Amino acid sequence: MPHRYPLLLIDRIEELEPGKSARALRCVTEQEALFTEQGSAVLSETLVIGSLAQTGACALLTLPEFVGETAYFGGIKAAEFMCPVYPRDVLELEVKLEKIKSSIGSGKATAKVAGQVVCLTELAFMIG
């Protein structure tokens, strides 16, 4: 991944199966939390999706034909958020790639905190 702080949205890759799946962790800090109208700090849903997209990009970019290329987030097919993510939470990110055709891929992604699902989504990726 060419990303660096503050655009790198994952802290560590836990498990990687090139072209198939990736599991990563993201430790949420107070510095990146956004304040809602209620006054409580929560991580933006956009940043949860971005973290999942970067996890999926790692699985895609480790294929031999894509080494050295750049992955782009292609879109969200569906997304469901079950509960908010707070500072000091550790996001457990998992992406399973389902289709890879030429330079386009898609997969299902799950974000959890302490084993509880906080987001389910389907993502699309493109290699540029």
Image (cartoon, helix red, strand yellow):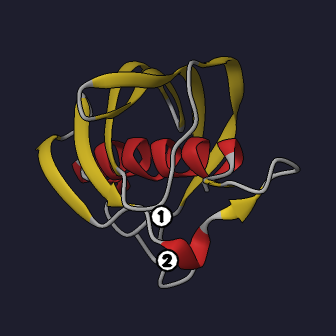
Label 1, label 2: how many angstroms apart (C-alpha)? 8 Å
Assign the C terminus to one quadrant of the image: bottom right
Residue at x 45%, y 71% (from the top left corner): 29
Under mark 2, the amino acid is: His
> What's the amino acid at mark 1?
Leu
> Which residue is denoted by mark 2 in the rendering?
3
Of marks 1 and 2, which one's residue comes earlier in the chain? 2
Q: Residue at x 22, y 40 (%)?
A: 23
Front in this rendered view, residue 80 or 125: 80
Residue 68, percent across and down? 37, 70
For residue 37, side relative to residue 117 (left or right)? right
Indicate the quadrant containing the N terminus: top left, top right, bottom left or bottom right. bottom left
Residue 46: x and y in percent read 70, 47
Give the percent coordinates (x, y) of residue 15: 11, 44
For the residues labelled 1 and 2, say whether their Cβ atoms are less than 8 Å apart.
yes
In this figure, which residue is indicated by the disc labeled 1? 9
